[in-house]
Image (cartoon, rainbow, N blue to C red):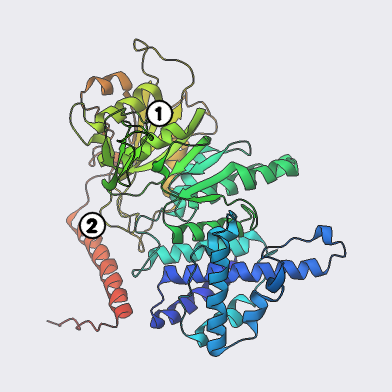
Amino acid sequence: MKTAARQLVDRLWNYCNVLRDDGVSSQDYLEQLSFLIFLKMAAEQEEANAKKTNPANHKHILPVTGEWKTRGWTELLYLEGEPLEEAYTKLLADLGHRSADGDHTTLSLIFNRARNRIENPANLRRLIVDLINEEKWLHARSDIKGAAYEALIARSAQDTRGGAGQYFTPRVLIESIVRCMRPTPYDTITDPACGTGGFLLAAYDYIAQEYEKDDLPDSEWEELRTKRIWGTEIVPTTARIAAMNLLLHDIGEATGAPVIEVTDALRQQPTRHASMVLANPPFGRKSSVTVSGKGDKDSDDAVSDATYYRPDFWLGNRTTTNKQLNFLQHIGTLLTDKGRAAVIVPDNVLDEGGKNSAGALIRRELLTNYNLHTMLRLPENIFQAGGVKAVVLFFDAVPGFRAETDPPRTGKLWVYDLRTDSNFTLKQRPLKAEHLADFEEQAFSKDDPDRTQREESERFHAFDAKELLADATVNLNVGEVDAASSDGKAPMSISELTVNVAQNLREAMSEIEAFAKDLGVELPKAQQG
């Protein structure tokens, strides 16, 4: 991160600590920042309009009719005390109300049901005047304003109190997956569980870096940033943060159609398809919603609030409440004929259920009718939630008809084990790009774009799909290397284990102390001797 972006992050985050005393969580703070930065950008747009003599060249973010000509950032800038709180609260309510009038833009998404969470007018004024007003947001470089906002999201996720998500995907993992997938400006890219937009941003950044010198027409870049990248998020607060995050990275338009849709992606069949899906669906085995292929929307057994009708799902009339299994099916149906997907799922997806279970049928479908070519076994302790075991599945859609007697479309499943002998923690030894470099080179070498020259190694092994399918449970929990032989390392000694445990305990204690400090709880001092 550039120095300017880091300094901006520090200033904004330090103020988040101040607002905790008013009961404002880090995610609430991010939400309020989104509102205020958006309003400041609208004011900057009007300043730019004032310098253009031809009204036809003017752009507007907020409404321009009637009372709106005197509303927005300017009215907040010169108020304080209760009048400021009242004006800000009313402004949010009016913008949120406006979104209910059939308006479907990024503006309406961000302000829909917006509420003021900063009830101390003095703190609100400081945030407006001393912090946000001192920066240029609309035309500032996206590598500063966007990077700063995204860093705030990351800090919020790491916050022990009210973080943005305990399964927040590490940025280095996202970037590694994107490098393996190699998106192009002509791809259509989506994330059906996009959270704060990390995968979408990384894909766009990769394209911008790789194709910067190709002199692509402006029309292609415009198409990419406004139409070819989109996401779906079920939580409205997270969706508005994602929309703001993308906007600050120049993806989407304030007054254009939102690139984030606020809904449950599993609710209905896709209305548009993507050539690339990147996702880390929410962890947790069970959902309160059942997804079924049985029923008819117009019949008596039509979908209820607790049942989604998805006749396009692989299970047919079978049902499952397992969220990861349902997302895998959804992602499969999202792909175009030659579409590609990379999906992070917990280990239970690999072997849950017995013979003819939903899990077995879905794994069979992946091997039989898709090309499930690669799996990365992720190390533990890289997510905010402790003890999570997860993998990344890379698979492609294969066009054309396949007869029952034809061989499976997956020839070999290649598995890279990054978990065995790994020793990562969130703070003391976080996952870094260098730790993923060997996987990227062995599994997705730029010199082997068709993945035909792969060779087995101590951590990288191939498994014949026909043999995997011969098992009635279609167990994909394979590829774990021998801890004693991986990379030629011997098992850790007693002293090494002791140091490892001590590091983990220190990190856990520091998080407990931070949490206690947030709650105002004084922990007893350790007894000596």
Q: Position of residue 347 (x, y in %)?
A: 27, 42
Residue at disc 2, secondary structure = helix
Place residue 518 in its image quadrant: bottom left
Query: What amino acid type should be assigned to the residue bearing mark 2?
Result: Glu
Question: What type is the residue that disc 1 sits on?
Answer: His
Helix, strand or loop under label 1: strand
Q: Could you say which is closer to the camera, residue 226 or residue 90?
A: 90
Q: Is residue 485 above or below residue 75?
A: above
x and y percent of residue 243 in the render? 54, 57
Q: Do the residues bearing badges 2 and 1 touch, measured as CB atoms within 8 Å? A: no
Q: Which mark is residue 109?
A: none
The residue positioned 26% from the left and 30% from the top of the image is 318
Disc with the residue nearer the chain's start (2 vs 1): 1
Residue located farthest toward the right when viewing the structure as drawn: 53
Q: Relative to residue 460, is residue 248 drawn left or right?
A: right
Which of the labelled discs sits on residue 373, or is there none? 1
Residue underneath mark 2: 496
The 10 Å Cα crowd at callout 2, few under 14, some 14 to 19, many 20 or more, is few
Q: Could you say where residue 334 lies in the image, as x and y percent from the top left? A: 46, 34
The image position of residue 95, as x and y in percent, is 58, 67
Q: CA distance from mark 2 to mark 1?
A: 36 Å
Q: For the point 42% across and 31% down, which residue is it?
A: 395
Instruction: Relative to 257, say whether 521 is above or below.
Output: below
Foreground mark, 2 or 1, reads 1
Q: Decide: few, some or many residues near mark 1? Use Cα within 10 Å; few <14, some 14-19, many ≥20.
A: many
From where the camera sits, is residue 373 visible? yes
Where the C terminus falls, by quadrant? bottom left
